[in-house]
Image (cartoon, rainbow, N blue to C red):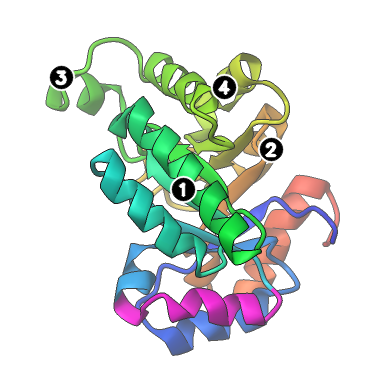
Amino acid sequence: MKYNPLIVALDVDSRERALELVDSLRDRAGMFKVGMELFYGTGGGIVREIKNMGCRVFLDLKLHDIPNTVSRASRVLTALGPDIINVHASGGPEMMREAARAVKSEASLLGVSRPLVIAVTVLTSINKEIFNSSLGIAGEVEETVVRWAVSARDCGLDGVVASPREVSSIRKACGNDFVIVTPGIRPAGAEAGDQKRVMTPAGAVQEGATYIVVGRPVTGSSDPAEAAGKIIEEIEGRVF
């Protein structure tokens, strides 16, 4: 399968709408993101349905709890067959290590491919002012993001979710094989919405992102397939 960095976020609450989008975008997207809204609204079966359509799934539930709870939840999610799951890096090293161990163990037990486990760093809706003043964390956002990325790598995780603004620094600190998934992607001319630390698709890939996550600019378009095609065109300089 040809490498395609575009992950389309299925941020809808309807199974029918989600599968309609998958059907129309399956030849344009490299993967589909199932987040909280869709997962909680329709249940875990949606992951299997998308996989049965021959598509890859990033299950974006951002697990964050005590290590034992996250370990058990990671096993349950692994059984659904996603290609990527994630936890919060702020949950700490023990929690991340337990998630990685649980996923590996469960995949081996079931005889299935192990999903990648990646850690969410600092949400793209948070800027320096919020980070310092509201959250009370001193220093630059980038410093914390890179520190958490290194911690995730050292705990056996495959990568991180981070804003495109930190990609270059993460890549330098964690190496070329480390997976970096970047939300906060806005094609040229698109509104930023609630995202604060944003970048264009081509800019993020040029910085070293492994995957870029795009939601509303594609799924909210009158022609999602055309919108996705323009993003790939922007990245590759030609129609995908």
Q: Where is residue 72 in the image (x, y as percent from the top left)?
A: 35, 54
Q: Closer to the N terminus: mark 4 or mark 3?
A: 3
Q: Which amino acid does label 3 sit on?
A: Gly
In front of the other: label 4 or label 2? 4
Out of 69 and 178, give the one closest to the viewer: 69
Residue designated by label 3 = 136
Q: Give the range drawn in magenta.
A: 41-54
State the predominant SS element of the stretch in magenta.
Answer: helix
In reply to whether residue 45 is colored magenta, the answer given is yes
Residue highlighted by disc 2: 205
Identity, as a three-letter code, of the amino acid under mark 4: Ile
Task: Give the position of the C terminus as an image quadrant.
Answer: bottom right
Q: Mark 4 points at which residue?
A: 170
Q: Residue at x 55, y 86 (%)?
A: 20
Please tell me which of labels 4 and 2 falls first in the chain. 4
Residue at the front extreme of this rendering:
109
Which class describes the residues within 10 Å of circle 1: few (<14), some (14-19), or many (20+)? many
Give residue 26's quadrant in the image.
bottom right
Q: Which of 187 and 10 is in front in this view?
A: 10
